[in-house]
Image (spheres, rainbow, N blue to C red):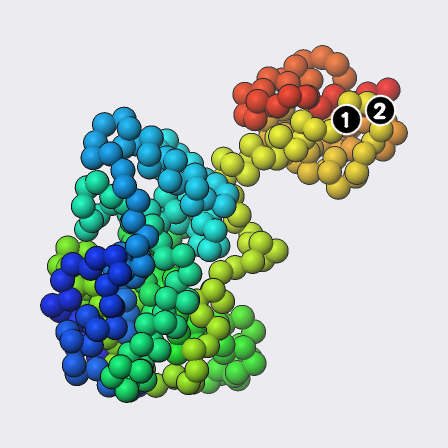
Amino acid sequence: MRLEVLPVTGIGDVSPGADLAALIGEAAPWLRDGDVLVVTSKIVSKAEGQLVDVPVDGPSRAAARDEILAAETARTVAQRGQTRIVQTHHGFVMASAGIDASNVDRSQVVLLPKDPDASARSLRAALRERYGIDVAVIVSDTMGRPWRNGLTDVALGAAGIDPIRDHRGETDPYGNELHITQMAVVDELAAAGELVKGKVGQVPVAVVRGYLDLPGGDGPGAVALVRDAAADLFSLGTAEARAAGLREAATLAPGDSDGDPEAVARAIATVAGVVAPGTIFTHVPGEGVHATPPGTEAPALIRFGEDIQRLRAALAAEAAPTSIIVPRTG
């Protein structure tokens, strides 16, 4: 497979109601069957009218953006100062829900397309009907990645291409069966397209030519890349997960029952490092919580003394709970 990545120039500014198929077809009459069209989500959003008016500057602008962000947020994943990583109603985890104030009039901000997969399917169909060409379409946007600096483009929507190339069950040249290898090819192609689009050159569309794995039909769309909650090992930021654990610990009923053993074990694990670092905590049903300090072998029962006061202080500082664990001490 040999790939070419080609910029589509001359599209210009896009206004609400614009015919993207016409704009792209006129700017790139050289499009041909089998091309992969990588379209920046911003021009899709503009054409679909996903623009919101905001004050030009001052505190009212920040307040308006906060209100818009709240409406676009399904849940907050992490927050540090003014930076908020959230999950959108689409399922994407992004900074500021993908709300963008670049390459748009200062009196507006741009939201993500309401349904990027539907946008990709619609554009693909329009290009086929108007110009008789069968192309794949990827709607892309820029994201950061956990654990890595820098940004890259990824696919928010896709049509005419399988979003994942699944190698599970195949055998590598050494005879090893592949068990987990699934390549997010639409993200790879979106990133390749960004290399010729850039962020300040006003080139919102690229074409990747030579990609051979186009199955026909629209396919499942980029929604297939959204990891479901059951498989998400990092559904919260570190500080947010810690605070959530402390809040969960703070809801255990004081002294009247041993409660759910798994919940008790999670609560103990959450606060152990705060109460007494290095200490091994063990819950004994019917008795309470035993603590084995570092360097000792004999556990001691936690009582209403300094340990509980430290626990109260830790919970209050970390999670501002409305109730406090009081381990049963007999």
The residue pinned by badge 2 equals 256
Quarter of the figure that contains the C terminus: top right
Taking 213 as reference, is 242 above or below it? Answer: above
The residue pinned by badge 1 equals 253
Q: Residue 263 appears at what percent x and percent y? A: 73, 38
Taking 247 as reference, is 34 above or below it? Answer: below
Q: Residue 128 appears at what percent x and percent y? A: 31, 82
Q: Residue at x 54, y 21 (%)?
A: 317
Disc 1 marks a residue whose amino acid type is: Ala
Q: Residue 54 appears at what percent x and percent y? A: 27, 38
Few, some or many residues within 10 Å of mark 1 (<14, 14–19, 20+): some
Q: Residue at x 68, y 21 (%)?
A: 323
Q: Residue at x 68, y 33 (%)?
A: 267
Snapshot quadrant of residue 244:
top right
Taking 261 as reference, is 298 above or below it? Answer: above
Snapshot quadrant of residue 305:
top right
Q: Residue 320 appears at what percent x and percent y? A: 57, 22
Few, some or many residues within 10 Å of mark 2 (<14, 14–19, 20+): few
Taking 155 as reference, is 258 above or below it? Answer: above
Q: Nearer the viewer, residue 5 or 160?
A: 160
Quarter of the figure that contains the N terminus: bottom left
Is 321 placed left or right of 287 in the picture? left
Is 112 placed left or right of 304 in the picture? left
Q: Nearer the viewer, residue 330 or 154?
A: 154
Rounded to the nearest whole Å, what is the CA distance between mark 1 and mark 2? 7 Å
The reply to whether callout 1 and callout 2 are in contact (CB within 8 Å) is: yes
